[in-house]
Amino acid sequence: MSDRRVLICDDHWIVRQAIRQRIDEIPGFEVVGEVEDGAEVVAAVREHRPDLVLIDVEMPGVNGIEATSRVMSRWPELRVLVFTAHGEDDLVRLAYREGAAGFLMKSAEIDQIREACETVVGGETWFPGYEGRLEDEDELQRLRALSEREREILGLLATGMRAQGVAEEIGIQPATVYTHVRNVVAKLGVDTRTQAVAIATRYAFLEPAAGSSGATSRRTPARSR
């Protein structure tokens, strides 16, 4: 099997050299290119066809999050590891949302770098210590993507109302309620209405849109976060 091809993106030459040295110590991996600006990543991926891209988060111009978004939109099969000197939760979540397969601190030891690289090129993700929180964030993002009407209907269903009762409550046809429920189920990536309500309940996401009647008074308390 040929070596895995690695592209490094960092605006500091000395950092790129340090990363290259570490990657060269990992059997089965080969650095095939370096760039110093996130704006150059797309062209570099097109030229070098890497299996793995290591991108610094904090760069002038096009940062690592935007660079990740650009390459993932073109090559969704590409594996990206973002790295930074800090590791704030928000940066990790942003990288995850844009399609990064993993996250590394610049201070990581060679054994951790090797394990991260092998893990992500093997098709898995590498977010040690963040996995549960990232899954929660993903569910929350899908909930927030619901329309006001969908949130209203989901909130009423979560109080125990049936579709007929929801239709009467907000003045629409039952068939329209069922259409909205199908859309909610699809947007949340679940199979049934019960599963959609369960997700909403976990986040106390039970408030109808403004102007509807008081399902809020029956909402489940939010879980600790």
Image (cartoon, rainbow, N blue to C red):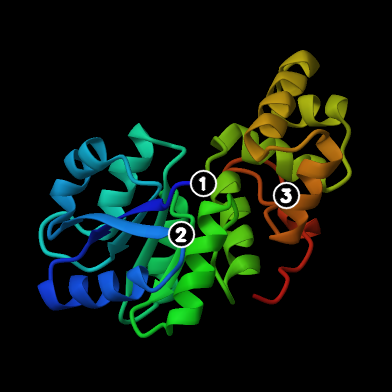
Q: Secondary structure under badge 3?
A: loop
Amino acid at pointer 2 = Gly
Judging depth in this view, the residue of 161 and 144 nearest the camera is 144
Residue 174: image location, x then y, percent:
80, 18
Question: Which residue shows up at 60% across the image and 32% down it?
Answer: 149
Foreground mark, 3 or 2, reads 2
Residue 140: image quadrant is: bottom right
Mark identifier at residue 28:
2
Drawn side of residue 193 relative to residue 108, left or right: right
Residues at marks 2 and 1 touching, judged by CB atoms closer than 8 Å: yes
Earlier residue among tags 2 and 1: 1
Foreground mark, 3 or 1, reads 1
Question: Which residue shows up at 65% across the image and 45% down it?
Answer: 208
- Residue at the disc numbered 1: 1
Give the spatial CA distance, label 3 vs label 1: 63 Å
How crowded pointer 2 is (Cα within 10 Å; few <14, some 14-19, many 20+) is rated as few
Amino acid at pointer 3 = Gly
Residue 189: image location, x then y, percent:
68, 37
Question: Which residue shows up at 34% across the image and 33% down it?
Answer: 74
